[in-house]
Image (cartoon, coloured by chain):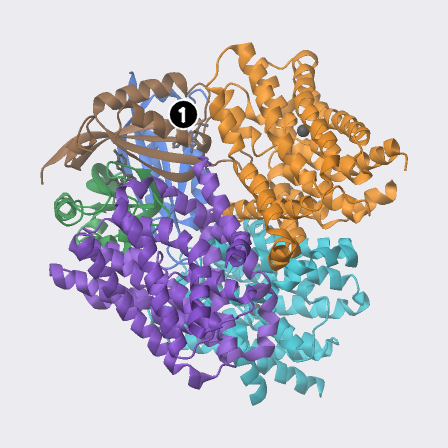
Chain colours: A brown, B green, C blue, D purple, E cyan, F orange
Amino acid sequence: MHTMHLRLITIVCESVLEERLTQTLRRMGASGWTVSDARGDGARGVRMSPTPGENVRIESLMEDRVAEQVLEHLATEYFPHYAMVAWTTDVAVVRGDKYKEGGKR
Amino acid sequence: MHTMHLRLITIVCESVLEERLTQTLRRMGASGWTVSDARGDGARGVRMSPTPGENVRIESLMEDRVAEQVLEHLATEYFPHYAMVAWTTDVAVVRGDKYKEGGKR
Amino acid sequence: MHTMHLRLITIVCESVLEERLTQTLRRMGASGWTVSDARGDGARGVRMSPTPGENVRIESLMEDRVAEQVLEHLATEYFPHYAMVAWTTDVAVVRGDKYKEGGKR
Amino acid sequence: MLDVLRTNLLSPIVLAFTLGVVARLARSEFQLPKDLYASLSIYLLFALGLKGGVELSHANLHQFAGPAGATLLLGALTPITSYLVLRHLGRFTIPDSAAIAAHYGSVSAVTFIAAQTFVTSMGTPAEGFMPTLLTLLESPGIHIALAIGLLQTGGGRPVGETLHEVLTGRTMVLLVGGLMVGVLMGEPHWKAVQPFFEGGFKGALTLFILEMGVVAADRIGDLRKVGPFLFGFAIVMPAIHGAIAAALGALVGLSVGGCTVLAAMAASASYIAAPPATRLNLPSANPTYSLTAALAITFPFNLVAGIPLYHAIARAVKGV
Amino acid sequence: MLDVLRTNLLSPIVLAFTLGVVARLARSEFQLPKDLYASLSIYLLFALGLKGGVELSHANLHQFAGPAGATLLLGALTPITSYLVLRHLGRFTIPDSAAIAAHYGSVSAVTFIAAQTFVTSMGTPAEGFMPTLLTLLESPGIHIALAIGLLQTGGGRPVGETLHEVLTGRTMVLLVGGLMVGVLMGEPHWKAVQPFFEGGFKGALTLFILEMGVVAADRIGDLRKVGPFLFGFAIVMPAIHGAIAAALGALVGLSVGGCTVLAAMAASASYIAAPPATRLNLPSANPTYSLTAALAITFPFNLVAGIPLYHAIARAVKGV
Amino acid sequence: MLDVLRTNLLSPIVLAFTLGVVARLARSEFQLPKDLYASLSIYLLFALGLKGGVELSHANLHQFAGPAGATLLLGALTPITSYLVLRHLGRFTIPDSAAIAAHYGSVSAVTFIAAQTFVTSMGTPAEGFMPTLLTLLESPGIHIALAIGLLQTGGGRPVGETLHEVLTGRTMVLLVGGLMVGVLMGEPHWKAVQPFFEGGFKGALTLFILEMGVVAADRIGDLRKVGPFLFGFAIVMPAIHGAIAAALGALVGLSVGGCTVLAAMAASASYIAAPPATRLNLPSANPTYSLTAALAITFPFNLVAGIPLYHAIARAVKGV
Ligand SMILES: Nc1ncnc2c1ncn2[C@@H]1O[C@H](COP(=O)(O)O)[C@@H](O)[C@H]1O
Ligand SMILES: Nc1ncnc2c1ncn2[C@@H]1O[C@H](COP(=O)(O)O)[C@@H](O)[C@H]1O
Ligand SMILES: Nc1ncnc2c1ncn2[C@@H]1O[C@H](COP(=O)(O)O)[C@@H](O)[C@H]1O
Ligand code: NA
Ligand code: NA
Ligand code: NA
């Protein structure tokens, strides 16, 4: 099986950011994303919605270069203000071209 | 702590496939799986259910060899027709024997 | 982008354990966690709630050393009795200090 | 007829549907929580079954054979006419033709309920056994259409699996099960649960249809992809099926209300049982076609204009 | 008695349970959305509490002490008899015996509700303070059984934690809280919320029990694992506890309806509060045993045959 | 007045709120499933809109201009007074002052409903067009406060986006949409859905408010962080806004009931539309301040003491 290496970025954040962040991912070159509902606790402990602890967990496969830029952007624009964590993982995918910017869509 | 390396395969796909794919995983030798509900957007953008964007996220720990076969199978049988992505990650588990085919169940 | 390596521990278990395990994570030094609802099947196949297959999926970023201790603790205290799997992954985070014990909270 | 149309347009059902559409077109994020939508649909189907069962226990069963036969005939006819028109006039691929035909060969429970509500408010209630007919019409059309598609392409997974899925799906359990519970429990027990299952019915339906408006409008962007042929098909085919069903209903002795409801059933397209069955069995069919046609064209057409039209046809063929 | 059994078998509650079982046995995927199930249970418990509270404010409180004492006695007795029988006759391990005993020492709110509904429809309504007794019976049995298990094995986490969990669990908040709200608000305010909390009650219960049928049937495959002893236990023990409770109820002056409901409570096994408590405190106990016995054997037994049986016993001991 | 307070304290609404608070303070894990909470809020808003629409179709519309003007005036005034007090007396930062002002400039639908229920039970029902006023009051205050905040700090995302989000949010779709459906459908159609949307209203409200008690109590721990100034603000400011609104209402000819409800609206603080809007537009504002003040102080204050107080003021200014 011919596989290809990509980065998976996982962002856990206040659910109010879902729409904005997925649009940002698209704009920065991600070919897609997957979101699920989550709850959690962290350093900040601020409660940002009437029903506390409502987070979303956003995952997106992308090239290393794009992942770098996304992390950079998150760190500058979002980390100072919002309850949020983000990490990246090395993963292998089949038919990785799909996830490249300008790749077949 | 004695740990062992395994592959974690993550499949995000149309929710209609949940039953069929978990059965396939079992048949191909996975000892178990974990499913959660998700939503998302990708290259295909087809809407396959009346309520759009309803995906499932299936995770399964397995040996490298089994993971290879599962990816192969997905790529041939499912990728051409269904909205779906799949990736694998290297992970470490405790008491890995449990996840081997024919391992203690 | 300056990133740092950490371990992400993922625990999938009976939902009755959520409260107890997140408290344990905190006590052992994790700076936070993220939980989502899941369902699944595994080796044990016991049904521990009236509505079967209700699991939670707990993720927590931590230093390698803490992850070791957590795995150790799970393996001794929980694995023998509860339906549960756990694995760890190498991930990269931005501003990793936040996740260190005694790190800025 | 115009009066009837106006009354229909100002019914809570049509207004709620319109509200859902307008909200979505105004790019509102509003939608019912997934579980509320599912809960309402469970409630509606079970209430429908229970009430149908209670009425069935009073119904004149020797009048039932004719309508049952007519229904099964429609269940065999409508997927075939749909397939032929799509494949040979519309030049759709075999899988696409079969997939769309599976939707139009089956039935939409909400359209059925809307028709029941309509004829009752018109003073021409339908026969007590109509929900039983609904259960007869749901499954055959899907299987006939899928069989055509699979025979033509020569693929396919075991037919038993699909049959089992549809026969044990939510709609069947709640409708058939509800019917049986209703028949068995009889009037006094029904009285005890009536406030819940009958008192709340129309309000719950209104809320449910509000979401259907949102979901339908969500697909308006796909109307372009669907093309003019399918657009026309999704209006003309239901009208033809409806007219045939109304006539057939009159033939087997149904009342005006019964003919109208039977017509609405034949004219309607499934969007609950058919989509997963076609998705799993005909994966190369494009689901955008069938779902957009069923949800964004045929459903609103029936709701707004179709049901009053079938009522007029039924009155005409019954000569009243 | 046969007549009563037949009426009971054709009640919406028993029919809905049967429908759920049949659907599951036919391998249907049907089930209520998780949140609907939880919502119905919240609604039922709170409605029960409110109505109980309103009735409590009219109740003759000097008649309350006896029944309350009897209830607490049953809460202490039933876990002990259960434990002894399981451990010494059934030869179960200590943790398994204690875990099962915790379930049978506590109470199933749905069985209570079914019993209330039954005696009302029999024309022998129970006392207004019965929901208060329900709250007294839920917790002690769990703690006594767990204490036995933990003392015998010498492990365990702080008992305070478990006590706190059960006392502040959903059932307690809604029942005790509802009772208080009901007592305080009085009749006129109750009238305003009655259509919601009383009008919808039986219908909502029917839907809830439909899902219980599915859940119970889901465990039928586990009946083999449970073995013949536990199978017999799950029918005979409730019958014995029920008979003792009916006699005790008569002794402290309860009416026929009250005796029946008290018997159903004593006979029933918890499947909401007990499972998490035993799972966390006696992790080496096999949850398949307790849940299968409580849900798939005792619950349907009580629903179908137990409640009418306790009613007959109550009539006998009351001499009517 | 004391009598009124007592009646209010023993209403299901206040009792349910108290129960939620007590349960949370006893560290109970009890809460409504997320989807049930959302479903109840959808039901309440839509029912409110529908009923308001039906009443609006009977209402004397030439009496509507004055109250509408008064409402818009309040929508402009309350965020400005709030901002000035917070910034200059309270010494909050610009973003924090603006964010809190956005909450107090908008309106809490549940407080509105509680006030409607209260005046009806007092025998002084409000005008039929009150829900229309509610829709007028929701949005302006948020935008004015955010505009102040953004102008002062000079940042911000396109104002159109926020405007769009609030105008197409759940509250607006259900209230405005419900109003229109209600106006259009008229009495006979309303009768058909009334058991669902009116019969269940107060009960559903009780359940909803139970959860609000839990959510409010959840923030009691944050009261320390909020500080004495904001604590005082969250009680005194609403009282002042309420008094102004009651007087203004009398001036434009509203009845005692209408004045009371208008006062409750002006006094209330939004916790549905305002939080996401401020979170996205003023990210450096601390959400703990605004949410704790709105939910844990102002909401219970209005529920328990504010509404009866505004009623007394309204009676005084109307001279009855
Ligand atoms: N160490 C961690 N591991 C996993 N998830 C975390 C961690 N810290 C924070 N989170 C998640 O990120 C959210 C925001 O965290 P914070 O910004 O630290 O308050 C929390 O609600 C958690 O869901
Ligand atoms: N780049 C991506 N990263 C993460 N998830 C994706 C990505 N692309 C697609 N997905 C997920 O896979 C589903 C199907 O994608 P597709 O087949 O590309 O339409 C989407 O609905 C997403 O949930
Ligand atoms: N091989 C596996 N891959 C992923 N998840 C698993 C696997 N095995 C078990 N699980 C999850 O862990 C839970 C408990 O597993 P077990 O203890 O093996 O019964 C299951 O319900 C699954 O959600
Ligand atoms: Na049809
Ligand atoms: Na018991
Ligand atoms: Na206000």
Residue A48 or residue D4, whichever sits in front: D4
- The image quadrant of residue F294 is top right
Residue F292 vs residue F59: left or right? left
- The image quadrant of residue E60 is bottom right
Secondary structure under tag 1 reads loop
Residue E170 or residue A28, whichever sits in front: A28
Please tell me how crowded label 1 is: few (under 14), some (14-19), or many (20+) other residues with Cα within 10 Å. some
* Quadrant assignment for ligand 1: top left
Residue F20 or residue F60, whichever sits in front: F60
Residue C96 or residue E305, whichever sits in front: E305
Chain letter of disc 1? Answer: C
- Residue under label 1, please give it: C101
Q: How many marks?
A: 1
Picture residue at 64% right of the left edge, 73% below the top: E261
Q: Position of residue D304 (x, y in %)?
A: 45, 54
Q: Amino acid at mark 1?
A: Glu
Q: Is residue E109 visible?
A: no
Q: Position of residue B40 (x, y in %)?
A: 32, 38
- The image quadrant of residue F172 is top right
Residue F84 drawn above or below residue A48:
above
Q: Is residue E283 visible?
A: yes
Picture residue at 75% right of the left edge, 35% below the top: F63
Q: Position of residue D203 (x, y in %)?
A: 56, 56
Residue B11 drawn above or below residue E74:
above
Q: Residue furthest right?
A: F319
Q: Position of residue D193 (x, y in %)?
A: 58, 69
Residue C27 vs residue F219: left or right? left
Picture residue at 74% right of the left edge, 30% below the top: F66
